[in-house]
Image (tube, helix red, strand yellow):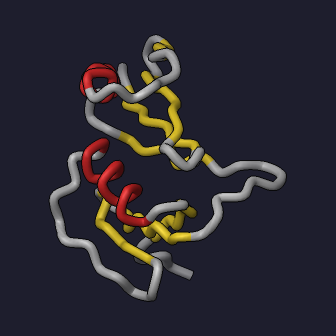
Amino acid sequence: MKVTSATVGLPVRDLAAAEAWYRRAFELTGPAVEPAPGVVEIVLGPIDLQLSEEPPERTGAQVTLRLGVEDASADYARLTGLGLALGPLEHVPGVVDYFDFVDPDGNALSLYSLNS
């Protein structure tokens, strides 16, 4: 099997509010498509992000959407400036910088950048 693309789906309570939050947080300007009622799909770098309006109930383990960025510390500062609540910016020398946070619906997110 050769995987040619990936789509990540996240449940949200309010589709319009979630789309606005993700556009603001990730500086998304591209058009969205609606592949089905109650679903919005937006290109997020090399993946498609699919937001679906449904109760974001949590059972068992929770998936974390980890996204690589050019400079985690710069994005940390930018997102802090937007008023988002973020976990601490962690620095592993010679390996990675990263931080965790959640969207308004409780979906776990993390941004990281590799360093040398």
Q: Residue 88 versus residue 102: which sits nearer the camera?
A: 102
Q: Please say if 68 is above or below 43.
A: above
Q: Nearer the viewer, residue 72 or 94?
A: 72
Pinpoint residue 20: horizontal percent, then vertical percent.
30, 54
In what quadrant of the picture does the C terminus appear? Answer: top left
Question: For the point 75% across and 53% down, which residue is it?
Answer: 58
Estimate the x, y position of residue 62 in percent, counting from the top left: 71, 49
Of the 4 image quadrants, the one containing the N terminus is: bottom right
Does 98 sit left or right of 33 as displayed? Answer: right
Residue at image position (43%, 16%) is 94
- Across and down, in percent, residue 99 comes to 48, 26
Q: Answer left or right for 77 relative to 7.
A: left
Q: Position of residue 75 (x, y in %)?
A: 29, 28
Q: Nearer the viewer, residue 99 or 12?
A: 12
Please name the residue shown 38% across and 41% down the image. Answer: 68
Compared with 52, 115 (above or below) is: above
- Which image quarter: residue 47? bottom left
Would you say 30 lies left or right of 39 here?
left
